[in-house]
Amino acid sequence: MMKSPITIEPMQAKYYPQVSRLLVYVFRGKFQHLTTMSDDDLALFFEKLFEHFPTDPASRRMVALQDGEVIGTISVKWRGEYNNGRKGRKQKLSSWKNFNRFGKWNLIKMLIGLHVFKHKPEMGECYIEDVVVHPDHQGKGVGKLLLQWALHFVQTEPMLDMLSLYVSGKNPRAKQLYERLSFYTHSQSNSMVWHLLFNEMKWDYMVMKMNNNEFDGSDQ
């Protein structure tokens, strides 16, 4: 039986559970030094983040769908000038009550971990926060489709002229993949904080300028 075509669509609430499961695949290895939460609890944690904290207007999450199944996701953000004000802060404080089931210490460690991964984009920069493909669908071009969406998004937004991402020094395969897709290493950083929290010290900051945007090679 032939599979349906893969489509790239905006994130919707009905996809929260599936996308949360996908995020466990990419974050489990990083957060295993921080928390002993099970995969089910980690997935529920991400799902509640989606439910209770609205997406920043200067960001976008997309999903790769095939036969109604989420087989990949990508999240990007750019520099925006937004201020939710006091009302937004009160809403956030109230929302954290929904996370009590995970335990205060687990919650604190997870929030520290997520904060460390935050990157503040410069003007014109579209930063890829995460790109994840389900293990059963890797090596089939899903990741390339997601990155092509990101490239098209940047090309159609006049205020953006660059894609960027971070890749772990322990993941040379991923770095080679991004290099085949026209990313190049802009800078390297060694962080003792990252090493202590995630046992990963070296990270490459990779960028793709819009005058160098032709994809080639295979993808995840």
Image: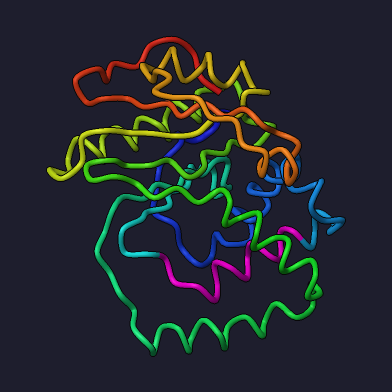
Residue 21 location in percent, x, y?
68, 52
Q: Which residue is drawn at 38% across and 64% down?
A: 56
The quadrant of the rendering that contains the N terminus is top right
Q: Residue at x 36, y 55 (%)?
A: 59
Q: Which of 111 and 19 is in front in this view?
A: 111
**Is 67 situated left or right of 108 in this image?**
left
Residue 180 location in percent, x, y?
43, 12
The number of discs equals 0
Residue 6 location in percent, x, y?
46, 36
Quarter of the figure with residue 104: bottom right
Q: Which of 4 and 33 is in front in this view?
A: 33
Considering only vertical position in the picture, is 158 above or below 104? above
Chain part drawn in magenta: 42-55
Q: Per the image, is 87 magenta?
A: no
Q: Residue at x 63, y 48 (%)?
A: 23
Quarter of the figure with residue 167: top right
Q: Residue at x 28, y 69 (%)?
A: 82
The quadrant of the rendering that contains the C terminus is top right
**Is 181 situated left or right of 48 in this image?**
left
Considering only vertical position in the picture, is 27 above or below 96? above
Considering only vertical position in the picture, is 35 above or below 200? below
Considering only vertical position in the picture, is 4 above or below 91? above
Question: Which residue, as the protein is rendered here, is positioned at the far left?
Answer: 158
Residue 65 location in percent, x, y?
50, 44
**Is 166 situated left or right of 49 in this image?**
left
Magenta segment main secondary structure: helix
Q: Per the image, is 43 magenta?
A: yes
Q: Nearer the viewer, residue 24 or 36?
A: 36
